[in-house]
Image (tube, rainbow, N blue to C red):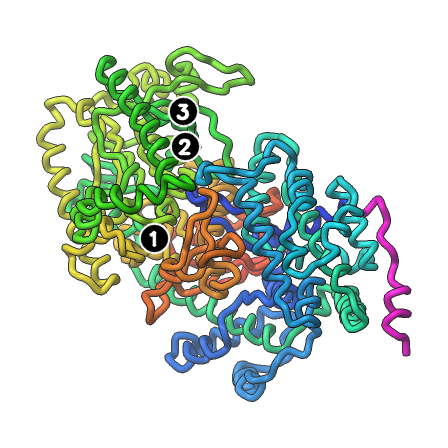
Amino acid sequence: MQTIEETLTSIPAIQNITLDQIIAEACQRIAPLWSLENFVAVNPYLGNVDKKFSIVAQELSYLANIDSTMPINFYLDKIEKKEIVLQDVEKALQSSKANQYKNAEIFLENLCRSSSKKSVLPSIATAMQLVSQTTNVEWERFAIQRISLWCASYFDNGQAQLSSLTKNKNLFTSWKREALIDKTPEIAGLKSFRKQLQNLPDQPTETIEYVLNEFGLKSTAASYYLQRLLLSLNGWAGFAARIDYDAKLDSKESNQVTQLLAVLVSWELCTYLSLKNENLEDKWKQNKLNLASIKEEAIIDGTVANTILLQEAFNFSEQRKIISVINATKTTVETEKEKEVQAIFCIDVRSEIFRRNLEKTDSKIQTFGFAGFFGFPVNLLPLGKDKTKAQTPVLIKPQLTVFEKIRENNTNNKTVKRLKIKQEIASLWKTFKSGAVSCFVFVSPLGLLYIPKLIFETFKLSHFAKGFFSGRSRKLTVISLQDNSKIQTNLGISLDTQVEMAKNALTAMSLTENFGKLVLLVGHGASTTNNPYGSALHCGACGGHTGEANAKVAASIFNNQYVRSQLKKSNINIPESTVFVACLHNTTTDQISIFNEDDLSSSHEQLFKSLKTNLQTATGVTRTERAIRMSTENKNVTQRSRDWSQVRPEWGLAGCSAFLIGKQQRTKNLNLNGKVFLHTYDCEKDTENKILQAIMTAPMVVTSWISLQYYASTVDNKKLGSGNKTLHNITAGIGVIEGFSGDLRTGLPMQSISDGNYLQHNPTILNVIIEAKIESLNQVIEQNKLVRNLVDNGWLKLLQMNEDGKISNRYTGNLNWETI
C-alpha cells in the first residue's frame, strides 16, 4: 500500500503549457456579480452549465460545503403533504442514470433509514483553513476581512472619501505594493508575512504557478484547489468576473479574476509559511491527496445524491401542476376581432397579474408579452447627469445613446444648471458629513435638521423613491448610433436604421397586423425607499433600471410617419389612427404612468378616457391580489413603497416557476398567479425559426438566470444569497456586506424569498414551455452550445406545446423527446 508521499509523487506535474488552462478553468466557474446601481439577476452556477446539475451539486458540496438542494426534511414534508407524489419520485428515479433503486417505495424506505448519516467523503480545505485548525485562530476569516477591505478601497465607486493609493495600477500590483507596507498581519501574529510576500513574483500568473509548486499541487488537483479558493471570496471574485464579462462583451482583454486569485494564493502561502509546523504539514499532505483524488464521476455523496433525486422529484411535481393547469384550460384560438387597445408588457412574472386583470376589464383590450427593452438597446444619459447607463439586457451591447431633455429649451437649460448645482452641493455636503473632523460637528447641532425628514419617513409621508420617473414633460432625444462601425453625431437616428429596428421589433413581438387604435408600450420599475436592492426589482431586460427610456424611444420611432411608410414595404401596415403610447408599470404600487398623451388626437379622447378607467380598475384588482399574498390590506400596498423600514416592499419575481412562449390567445383564460413569464410568439409567422432562436438564446437564458438566482438564494442563502437584509451595510457603493466586515454578498436576502414563516419561492428548476414544432426546437438547440448546455444538463426543463395549445412533449436530452 502506497504512503501519502508515494501517492502524491506518482501524480503528473503541472506542465507550463497547461497552467493558463488550469487558471482559466477555475476562473470561468465564478459567476459575474453586478453592482447595486444596476443589480442584475444572474445564474450563480453560470460557469458550470457545461456540466450536469447533479455533478455540479456534488462538486460544490465537496469543495466548499455549498448546498444546491434543500435539506431532506423539506422534501419529506412535501411528500407528506402530497405535493410530491410517488409518480414524481418514480419519474425522478427513471431520469437518473445513477439510480440504484427498483421503485419509489424502496427509495423512500431506504431514505428514511439513511437520512441521518453524515458524508463519508474527505473534506477539501484551503491552507488558511488548515492553519486555523492547527492554531485555533480564525486566520481564514482574518484574511477574508483584510482582502475584502482592500477590495472595497480598490474598487470603490465614489462612496469612500479616500480610495486605494495605487488604484491606477493593476489589481495584483496595487495589492502587493500596499501589502508590503501593511504591518497588520504581523501585528496579528503572522510574523514573517511580508518577508514571505517579498519572495513572490510580481506577475499574477507567475505567482499562482509559484504557489502551486510550493504547495506541491499537480494538474489533477490544481484547478479544483483554485476554484475552492475563489469560492472562499465568492462575492469579490464575482465582481471581478463581471468586469471581465463586460470587457469580453466589448472585445477587450481583462483578467481581474486571475489577479484576485493571485492575491488569494499569496495570502495562502504567506500564512502557511508564517505558521508552518509538523501537524500542519501532515494535514496539508492529506488535503493534497483529497484534491488529487477528485474525479467528476467519482464524487458521490449518498446524502447529496438522495437530495438531488428528491429535488428532481420536486421539479417534476411543479411541472405536473403547470401542465395540468394549462392542459385543462380552454385555449382555442379565437376568431380575430378588432381590438381597440393593445398593451405590450415585459415578460416579467409581475406583468402576468396586471395583464390578466386588464384584459378582463374590456374584451377589446389585448395584451402581449415581450422583453421590456422592446428591442431598442440604448444607453441613457439622464437629465443633468454626466454618466450614461445601459438600458438593455446584459447579454446585449447597447447601440444607441439617448439623452433626457425637457421639451422647452429654456426650461431644459435652467433645469440642467439647477441639477448640476444641486449635485455639487450634495457632494460637498457628503464630504462634510463624512469628514474625519467635520462629522462630529454635523452629528451634534446639524443632525437636528433631519428630524422633520425622520418624522415624515417614519409615518410614510415621504414621496416615492428618488429616481422613479413620473414626468411627462421629459422626452428622449437620440444623439448617436453605432451603425456599420461609423458613429453618427447628428441629432436623431438615421431614418433607415429606425425603419430596420422598428421592423425587427414588431416582428419579434408578433405584432405586424391588426393594430389597435392605441398600442401601449409598458415598461416597468419599482419604487422603494431605503432599499439597497431596489434595482433588483426593476427590469432585468433593462439592465436593472426602469423601462421608461426604452418605451419612450420605441413609441417615438413607431409613431414616425416616415418609418410607417417604409414598413409598408415589409407588409407591416400601421394605420394612421394608431398611436403608440409610452407607459411605465410601477410594480410596487401597480400604478401605470403614461408619458406621451400629447401625441393623442381628439379622435382618441373618448377611448383614452375609457382606457384610463380600465387601467385604474386593473390596478385595484391587482393590488388586492398582491395584498392577499402580503397578508395586508389593499391600502397598505402603496404605503410599503414609502416605508423606509419595510424589508418586503414587494415580492419581486419570487415564485417564478415557468416561462410560456406561445400565441397571445394561449393565456387568455389562464390564471398563473404571477409565477409565469409570458412571451408572445407565433410560430406560424416564423418560418425560418429566426425569432425562435432569438427568444431561446436571449429571453430564455435571462429567465433561467432569474430563476436560478432565486433558486440558489433559497437552497443556500448563507453561501449563495445575501443573508439578513437588516444587517446589510453598503460597501464601496458597489454591494453589501452582512454586518461590519466580510466578503461582498451575492444573490438575494432572505426577506426576498421568505415571509419569515414560509418560503415565498419554491426552489424548482424553471419549466420552459414553447409552442413550436419539435424539429424547430431541435434545430435551435443543436446550433447553440449555451442553449444545449442548459437543456441537456438539467439547468432548465423544456416542454413543447402543440398546435392545440396543449403541452404534449417533454425534452429528455440529446435532442430526444417523450410524449406526455
Residue in the image at 52% along x and 72% along y: 91
Q: Secondary structure at mark 3?
A: loop
Label pair 1/2, CB-CB below 8 angstroms: no
Looking at the image, is 296 positioned above or below residue 386? below
Q: Which residues are magenta?
A: 1-18
Q: Residue furthest top?
A: 490
Q: Nearer the viewer, residue 786 or 225?
A: 225
Residue 59 visible: yes
Looking at the image, is 553 positioned above or below residue 72? above
Q: Quadrant of residue 554?
A: top left
Q: Residue 556 in the image: x percent, y percent?
A: 30, 23
| Mark earlier in primary sequence (3, 1) | 3
Q: Quadrant of residue 79?
A: bottom left
Residue in the image at 14% along x and 38% along y: 612
Circle 2: residue type: Gly
Residue in the image at 32% along x and 29% along y: 425
What residue did someone put label 2 on?
Answer: 375
Using residue 748 as the reference point, say whether residue 329 is left or right of it. Answer: left
Cα–Cα gap, marks 2 and 3: 25 Å
Which of the two marks, 2 or 3, is nearer to us in this view? 3
Q: Residue 228 in the image: x percent, y percent?
A: 66, 59
Q: Is residue 684 magenta?
A: no
Badge 2 density bin: few <14, some 14–19, many ≥20, Cα 10 Å: many
What residue did someone put label 3 on?
Answer: 386
Q: Secondary structure at mark 1?
A: loop
| Mark earlier in primary sequence (2, 3) | 2
| Mark earlier in primary sequence (1, 2) | 2
What residue did someone put label 1 on?
Answer: 652
